[in-house]
Image (tube, grey):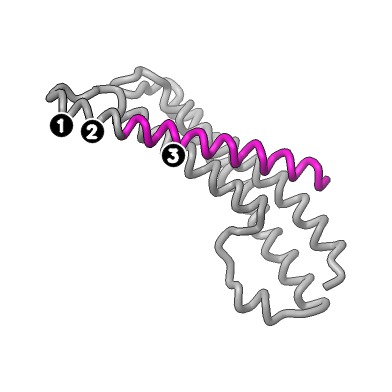
């Protein structure tokens, strides 16, 4: 299980880093074409928006895999023994619930509902843009199942 988590962490970190590099280059290109060439690039704004959405979702799923997501740290740090184990399992189960019902199920409904609608400039299906929600939900679900397994094995 740790090997799976390691591979997923590495893949997500490299993918997110690559998307951020592409994002930076596209924004730089847009600034150059707008202010230096006086002929703004048309496609970059829409592509940057899509990449920002995808990199945000993938970065958030990476945070769950490395357990660096937002949490009430003071409560987690003050807990010990069985209370700590129960708290960790509760937190990870709540995240799992959110990932399954909001991201996977809700995200799929959202994406499939707008599959026929195209983006104005790139002509790309909005459903493909929003499909990152269920994809991220699946990734977070896998992470949370591994995290819950780790919680159950926790000695303190």
Residue mark closest to the camera, 3 vs 1: 1
Residue mark closest to the camera, 3 vs 2: 2
Q: How far across and down, in percent of the image, does residue 46 sit? A: 32, 29
**Residue drawn at (29%, 21%), measured in percent from left and top?**
121
Pointers 1 and 2 in contact (C-beta within 8 Å)? yes
Q: In the rendered image of this protein, does residue 87 appear above or below residue 26?
A: below
* Gap between marks 3 and 1 measured at Cα: 26 Å
* Gap between marks 1 and 2 measured at Cα: 6 Å
Q: Quadrant of residue 142?
A: top right
> Label 1 belongs to which residue?
35
Q: Which residues are magenta?
A: 1-27
Residue 21 belongs to magenta span? yes
Q: How far across and down, in percent of the image, does residue 83 sit? A: 77, 78
Q: Nearer the viewer, residue 99 or 69?
A: 69
Q: Which mark is residue 31?
A: 2
> Label 3 belongs to which residue?
53
For marks 3 and 1 on the same chain, the one whose residue lies earlier in the sequence: 1
**In the image: residue 1, left or right of residue 67:** right
Q: Quadrant of residue 44?
A: top left
Density class for disc 3 (Cα within 10 Å; few <14, some 14-19, many ≥20) is some
Residue 44 belongs to magenta span? no
Secondary structure, mark 3, is helix
Pointers 3 and 2 in contact (C-beta within 8 Å)? no
**In the image: residue 118, left or right of residue 132:** left
Q: How far across and down, in percent of the image, does residue 118 sit? A: 36, 21
Q: How far across and down, in percent of the image, does residue 124 sit? A: 40, 20
Q: Nearer the viewer, residue 64 or 105?
A: 64
Secondary structure, mark 1, is helix
Q: What quarter of the picture does the N terminus occupy?
A: top right
**Residue drawn at (53%, 39%), measured in percent from left and top?**
16
Residue 104 visible in the current orientation? no
Dominant SS in magenta: helix
């Amino acid at each position: 299980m740790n090997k799976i988590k390691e591979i997923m962490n590495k893949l997500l970190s490299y993918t997110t880093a690559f998307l951020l590099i592409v994002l930076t280059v596209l924004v730089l290109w847009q600034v150059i074409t707008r202010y230096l060439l006086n002929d703004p690039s048309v496609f970059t704004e829409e592509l940057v928006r899509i990449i920002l959405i995808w990199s945000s979702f993938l970065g958030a799923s990476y945070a769950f895999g490395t357990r660096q997501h937002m949490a009430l740290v003071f409560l987690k740090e003050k807990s010990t023994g069985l209370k700590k184990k129960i708290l960790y399992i509760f937190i990870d189960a709540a995240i799992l619930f959110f990932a399954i019902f909001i991201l996977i199920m809700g995200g799929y409904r959202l994406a499939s509902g707008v599959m026929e609608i195209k983006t104005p400039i790139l002509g790309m299906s909005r459903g493909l843009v929003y499909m990152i929600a269920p994809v991220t939900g699946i990734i977070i679900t896998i992470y949370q199942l591994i995290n819950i397994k780790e919680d159950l094995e926790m000695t303190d």
